[in-house]
Image (tube, grey):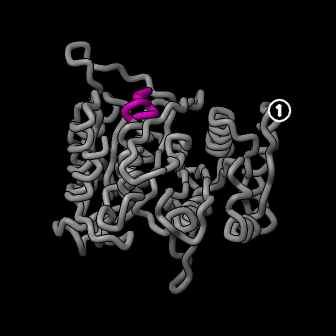
């Protein structure tokens, strides 16, 4: 999946970029869906999301149509239901995703003040999405602080501090429990080793703070040590969280041959840090949530209600996430064609970049520019 995000070499802004690199997938969580025998198209569940979600989703649909991608969309409404004190996803959406085995998701806003837990967490729990894959790569032609960032981080997606286990001990004192289990740790760490092997990276870096969290992070590290014996072709390294942050900021290029893996909270923070180093914006960052059978690909930025409906939103993150999805589905040529058009559009000129990237393009004009480069 990371190789789907390589930076193209641009000799001129009008050059059409066509990729020939293979996109091997890890042995865990592979897509097993089949196209409709009548149409030859795959059905993909689409959660358009809130705020700017519908606008950037329309950009994806328009570009997929122009690129003649063999995908038909099945819209999913995940407006949460509160049943027996728990946030749940409507049955129709659950059935759609279980049937199609893959979904694309725009940004979601969890209703405030109604007792709902995070909708993103609810989706991960509902579909067993144990690994969050976040590649972060510099984009040719778009200048940021660093020009050589090529990072992959895999975050445990179901437990840790995000387990939602909190209670009041006494007025003014609350307790939040960090849940780490052997099963969840083994799932995500094994996936990290398989991912590294699939994309040809010789190192897996296990990020932790077991010097302080001796039992919880200690369990995570011990599981990694055990699994490392099964992957003699991969070097396993252990790094304390604070050291990893310092190292990646000082020299992100030192991790271009590595896949990092860590518990939930650390991954949430580190993945955004990586995005800042690579692109200076979450608007260019794709993401995949991987389960054994089902995977959901998403833009990780917020719903940006302040610009919703104003034709200002940047659809790049959702577009690159859709390219990760297409590679996951084995539709590599379509993924390459769209990705190359997106990246060459961003590289071409400020007029073809949206406001968050210092440009003047609208959502629709950016979409049209991408289509012109397909």
Q: Main secondary structure of the magenta part?
A: helix
| Residue 79 placement, left or right of 359 | left
What residue sits 17% from the left and 69% below the top?
Answer: 310
Q: Position of residue 292 (x, y in %)?
A: 51, 32
Q: Which residues are magenta?
A: 326-334
Q: Position of residue 180 (x, y in %)?
A: 65, 53
| Residue 113 placement, left or right of 291 | left
- Front in this rendered view, residue 148 or 33: 148
Q: Position of residue 45 (x, y in %)?
A: 28, 37
Name the residue tied to disc 1. 232
- Front in this rendered view, residue 92 or 100: 100
What residue sits 21% from the left and 18% below the top?
Answer: 39
Q: Quadrant of the C terminus?
A: top left
Mark yes or no: residue 167 visible: yes
Q: Position of residue 59 (x, y in %)?
A: 24, 50
Residue 210: say if magenta: no
């Amino acid at each position: 999946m990371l190789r789907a995000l390589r930076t193209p070499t641009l000799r001129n802004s009008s050059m059409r970029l066509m990729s020939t690199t293979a996109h091997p997938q890890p042995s865990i969580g592979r897509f097993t869906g089949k196209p409709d025998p009548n149409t030859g198209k795959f059905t993909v569940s689409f959660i358009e999301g809130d705020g700017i979600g519908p606008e950037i989703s329309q950009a994806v649909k328009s570009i997929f149509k122009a690129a003649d991608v063999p995908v038909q969309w099945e819209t999913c409404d995940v407006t949460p239901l509160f049943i027996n004190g728990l946030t749940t996803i409507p049955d129709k959406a659950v059935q759609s995703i279980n049937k199609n085995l893959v979904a694309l998701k725009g940004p979601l806003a969890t209703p405030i003040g109604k007792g709902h837990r995070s909708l993103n967490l609810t989706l991960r729990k509902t579909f067993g999405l144990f690994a969050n894959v976040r590649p972060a790569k510099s984009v040719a032609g778009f200048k940021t602080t660093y020009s050589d960032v090529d990072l992959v981080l895999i975050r445990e997606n179901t437990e840790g501090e995000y387990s939602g286990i909190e209670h009041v001990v006494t007025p003014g004192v609350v307790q939040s429990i960090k849940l780490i289990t052997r099963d969840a740790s083994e799932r995500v760490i094994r996936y990290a080793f398989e991912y590294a092997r699939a994309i040809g990276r010789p190192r897996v870096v296990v990020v932790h703070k077991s010097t302080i969290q001796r039992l919880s992070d200690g369990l995570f590290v011990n599981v990694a040590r055990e699994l490392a014996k099964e992957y003699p072709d991969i070097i396993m390294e252990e790094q304390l969280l604070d050291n990893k942050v310092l190292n990646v900021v000082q020299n992100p290029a030192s991790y271009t041959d590595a896949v990092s893996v860590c518990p939930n909270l650390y991954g949430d923070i580190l993945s955004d840090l990586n995005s800042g180093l690579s692109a200076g914006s979450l608007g260019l960052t794709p993401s995949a949530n991987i389960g054994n059978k089902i995977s959901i690909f998403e833009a990780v930025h917020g719903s940006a209600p302040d610009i919703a409906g104003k034709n200002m939103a940047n659809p790049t993150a959702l577009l690159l996430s859709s390219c990760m999805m297409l590679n996951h589905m084995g539709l590599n040529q379509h993924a390459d064609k769209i990705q190359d058009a997106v990246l060459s559009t961003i590289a071409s000129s400020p007029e073809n970049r949206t406001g968050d990237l210092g440009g003047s393009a609208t959502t629709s004009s950016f979409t049209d520019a991408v289509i012109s480069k397909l």
